[in-house]
């Protein structure tokens, strides 16, 4: 199986091994972080229950009674972070799947996209650490955060740990930076190899190479569409469930009945399934068969997905209290979905215009295992062919 993906290319083998090591190490560390954070969320909720059950704390100079707004902000900010740990784990598996696909199809553009994706995960690893450290921040005046920290440190001989996952989060940040840097070098080597492989299969026809480049970019963007659309769906559905479980903390107008929660989940699942599964299948079938009908259906569905994402983006801005702790990430994912969606629709139209020009006959030829580095063919390490 591995030999079918890598062929005789040593750099393809290195890339697959490095990606696998990255996935195993980061997933293991993120799993530990997830478990420690889950324990912390439980401790925070227990501390809030203790505070709510008393009129004052013995080690406070003045009584403090937290409002539902205070409780909601702390509880949601801590609980929602668990969703992002899971997304980070899924992202590791996603980059490995992307790499296997890129190697099989000799997709140099997708290799470059994986480099960018890894760099984005380095940034997110730092953001993850920052978010976790800001759940409870001591303030100069009475606050729920101060009260919880007081309870955590009440027993100085056996204090309740806060942010116990910090060493592992630092490890993830450092290791992700190393993994991303090394993979960028490996990707450069793969870029040189794949450029020559594609040239051999497609030839020197510049028009054909341009069509193939658009095809590669379109297929790659569709894959990222799936990831970010599912990422938004996971966050949105998690927030609906959390909102129902913690609805006593919400104002009356924002509380959910079980039936309302079920309806929201079902509607969103139907729409996200269409955007994440049905639309990519239409794109795949349309390209495979050069079916304009499938591509037209894909474009119409793409516009519908854009409208839905715009509606959700408006909702996040207008009803920010409903998405406490997740506003920034929901906005980020929705904006990415909108940008990717517009690019996808444009590229789908360009790919459809390229139908019946002979590209489909070449696509199957490019996929395969025979990779011949330019150095071994031309005798010069400085010369290579590229699809650019």
Image (cartoon, rainbow, N blue to C red):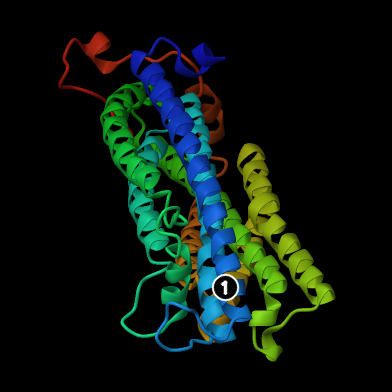
The residue shown at (68%, 69%) is 240
Using the image as rendered, state which of residue 2 and residue 83 is in the foreground.
83
The residue shown at (37%, 42%) is 172
Which quadrant of the view contains residue 339? bottom left
The residue shown at (70%, 51%) is 278
Which residue is the site of mark 1? 48
Using the image as rendered, state which of residue 336 and residue 352 is in the foreground.
336
Q: Tag 1, which secondary structure?
A: helix
Position of the C terminus, as image quadrant, is: top left
- Residue 245 lies, in percent from the top left, at 71, 70
- Residue 232 lies, in percent from the top left, at 57, 61
Position of the N terminus, as image quadrant, is: top right
Vertical arrangement, residue 189 with respect to residue 288, above or below: above
Vertical arrangement, residue 48 with respect to residue 237, above or below: below
- Residue 314 lies, in percent from the top left, at 54, 81
Vertical arrangement, residue 150 with respect to residue 368, above or below: below
């Amino acid at each position: 199986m591995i030999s079918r993906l890598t062929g005789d290319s040593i750099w393809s083998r290195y890339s697959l091994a490095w990606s696998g090591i990255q996935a195993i190490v980061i997933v293991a560390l993120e799993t530990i972080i997830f478990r420690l954070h889950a324990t912390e969320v439980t401790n925070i909720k227990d501390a809030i229950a203790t505070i709510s059950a008393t009129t004052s704390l013995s080690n406070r100079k003045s009584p403090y009674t937290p409002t539902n707004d205070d409780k909601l902000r702390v509880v949601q900010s801590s609980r929602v972070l668990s969703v992002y740990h899971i997304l980070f784990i899924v992202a590791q598996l996603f980059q490995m799947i992307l790499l296997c696909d890129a190697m099989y199809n000799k997709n140099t553009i997708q290799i470059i996209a994986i480099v960018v994706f890894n760099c984005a995960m380095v940034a997110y690893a730092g953001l993850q650490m920052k978010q976790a450290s800001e759940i409870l921040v001591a303030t100069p005046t009475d606050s729920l955060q101060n009260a919880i920290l007081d309870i955590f440190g009440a027993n100085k001989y056996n204090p309740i740990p806060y942010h116990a996952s910090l060493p592992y989060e630092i490890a993830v940040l450092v290791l992700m930076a190393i993994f991303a840097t090394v993979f960028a070098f490996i990707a450069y080597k793969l870029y040189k190899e794949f450029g020559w492989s594609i040239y051999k299969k497609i030839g020197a026809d510049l028009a054909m190479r341009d069509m193939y480049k658009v095809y590669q970019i379109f297929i790659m963007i569709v894959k990222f569409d799936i990831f970010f659309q599912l990422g938004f769906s996971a966050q949105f559905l998690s927030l609906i469930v959390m909102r129902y479980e913690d609805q006593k903390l919400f104002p009356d107008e924002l509380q959910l009945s079980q039936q309302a929660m079920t309806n929201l989940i079902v509607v969103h699942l139907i729409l996200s399934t269409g955007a994440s599964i049905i639309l990519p299948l239409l794109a795949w079938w349309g390209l495979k068969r050069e079916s304009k009908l499938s591509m037209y259906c894909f474009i119409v569905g793409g516009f519908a997905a854009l409208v839905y994402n715009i509606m959700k983006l408006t909702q996040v801005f207008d009803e920010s209290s409903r998405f406490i702790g997740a506003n920034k990430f929901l906005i980020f994912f929705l904006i990415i979905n909108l940008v990717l969606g517009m690019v996808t629709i444009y590229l789908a139209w360009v790919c459809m215009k390229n139908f019946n020009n002979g590209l489909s006959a070449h696509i199957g030829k490019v996929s395969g295992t025979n990779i011949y580095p330019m150095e071994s063919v031309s005798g010069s390490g400085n010369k290579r062919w590229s699809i650019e």
